[in-house]
Image (cartoon, rainbow, N blue to C red):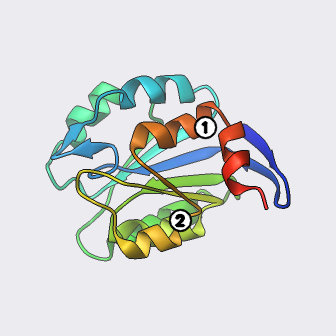
Amino acid sequence: MISCLIPGRGTLEINHLVCDVNGTLALDGKLLPGVAEAFNQLKHNVTIHLVTADTFNRLPELEQRLAGSVSKFHRLTGGSEAEQKLEYIESLDDPGVAAIGQGTNDRLMLKSAALGICVLSAEGAAIETLLSADIVMPDILAALNLFLHPDRLKATLRQ
């Protein structure tokens, strides 16, 4: 678990990290540099989940590459992807969920999570998703580093 006392908000406790794949962790279906290493560091503190529509049909490759770090890989079915991501978050039945994404179909999971992070990416970031997030980060590595250095959360979220 990752725990951080946020002045004016209470203690934020994160047990699960749910990440979108394409546009967030990967560009054109290829994992961005540094993501595997960051997950390898985070796996000791949170359960890592990847949710994807697998636009580029690379999920088997990602599963192989990230098998030691990522606990769950969830492929969405076509259509209603935003709702499926929300349902996935809700199925964890844990208030300690953080979510990271950037596309329109990530907006509901970011809004529902205890901590929603929108990352800016080479694909861009959807305005609805940006407005649904608690934090906006310049890239995925900066977002993942929030969990490796939780006091950064305090600096951004304090009231």
* Tag 1 residue: 147
Rendered residue at 43%/65% (across/down) = 85
On screen, residue 124 versus residue 88, left or right, reads: left
User: Which image quarter holds the N terminus?
Assistant: top right
Residue 132, above or below 33:
below
Q: Residue at x 43, y 70 (%)?
A: 129
- Residue type, numbered disc 2: Ala
Considering the numbered disc 2 on the image, is that residue within a helix, a strand or a loop? loop
**Position in image of residue 143 (x %, y %):** 49, 43
Residue 111, label in figure: none
Q: Is residue 159 left or right of residue 131?
A: right
Tag 1 secondary structure: helix
The residue positioned 51% from the left and 72% from the top of the image is 132
Spot occupied by residue 152 in the image (x, y as percentages of width and height): 66, 41
* Quarter of the figure with residue 62: top left
Tell me the amino acid under the disc marked 1: Phe
